[in-house]
Amino acid sequence: MRQRILTAALALAVFVPFMIKGGAWFAWLIFILGAIGLYELARMKQVPYLSEVGIVSTIAIMSIILPERYFDQILPMMNPVGLFFICGMVLLVLTVYRYDRFNFVDAATLIFGVLYIGVGMRFLIEIRDLGLENIFYLFIVIWSTDSGAYLVGKRYGHYQLAGHISPKKTIEGALGGIVTALITTSLYATFVNLDIRYGHSLAVLTVLISLAGQLGDLVESAFKRYFQVKDSGNLLPGHGGVLDRFDSSIFASILFMVWQGITNFN
């Protein structure tokens, strides 16, 4: 527990200043984290990522994660969506010329991983660009849900939420997480003016984001169970890897942007 707290404190000490700074600083940090997350997924699948496969995949996830206003700073003449398709084709071509160690399932895993991780991480950047108060709101929902689910589940948990995937998660814990999120965000909204679509239904949005975050956590648990690993990586001692920490954020950010009605890739 001591190691988990220390790692969390150090991670927040790095992450929060970038989040406050926003702009390109935050965008590039999210890209780096997304690229590490894709590497973790590849490693779980035992894909030979430290090769041309990894180079192409990293370019692909950059084209998805970075909004065009930041992407243009490095490749002003390249269409990011077009670049993603080119990278996808190159990965498929590599299944021909590297067939002994890189197959169609490996390529499909990476292409799906680029979309799964890339879109969720991209929307974190988009939410930050909508305003610092919005990204703080999102993480308050996620973090308070995690804390509430853990505390309530540990004390009152009885009925498993998805026992075949994550035996320790309970329905009581999930409900406790939602209630905790509602309490903390209502306090937050009292002091901060949130510019959110249908702001009068903030409680509904909070419940939906809390649920989405918990489902994202379960999806990551399903990945790990399928690949038979305990953690996605070991970048954060006591917490696992990037995907272990951002699994909820990926789903939550997508839900937030759908609520806002902003899902374009301009």
Image: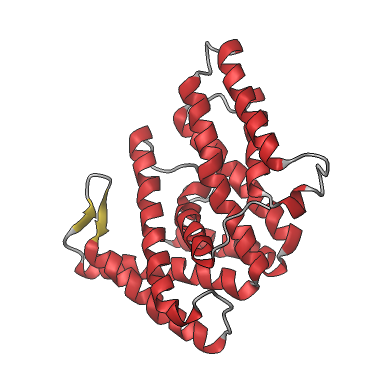
- Which one is in front, 6 or 86? 86
Q: Is residue 141 left or right of residue 84?
A: left
| Position in image of residue 119 (x %, y %) | 56, 49
Report the residue at 39% width, 74% height from top.
Answer: 204
Residue drawn at the location 46% of the way across and 52% of the way down = 247
Dividing the picture into quadrants, the one containing residue 230 is top left
Q: How many marks?
A: 0
Residue at 36% from the left image edge and 63% from the top image edge: 211
Does residue 152 lie above or below 103 as drawn?
Answer: below
Tell whether 220 sits left or right of 194: left
Of 144 and 14, which appears nearest the observer? 144
Residue 122 visible in the current orientation: yes
Q: Nearer the viewer, residue 126 or 136?
A: 126
Residue 238 in view (yes/no): no
Residue 125 pos. (x, y %) = 64, 59
Rendering colour mode:
secondary structure
Q: Is residue 29 left or right of residue 69?
A: left
- Residue at left 33%, top 39%? 225
Among all residues in the image, which is located at the extreme left? 158
**Quadrant for the N terminus in the image:** bottom left
Tell me residue 141's x, y (percent).
45, 70
Residue 23, image x and y in percent? 73, 62
Q: Quadrant of residue 262?
A: bottom right
Seen from this angle, which residue lies furthest bottom?
190
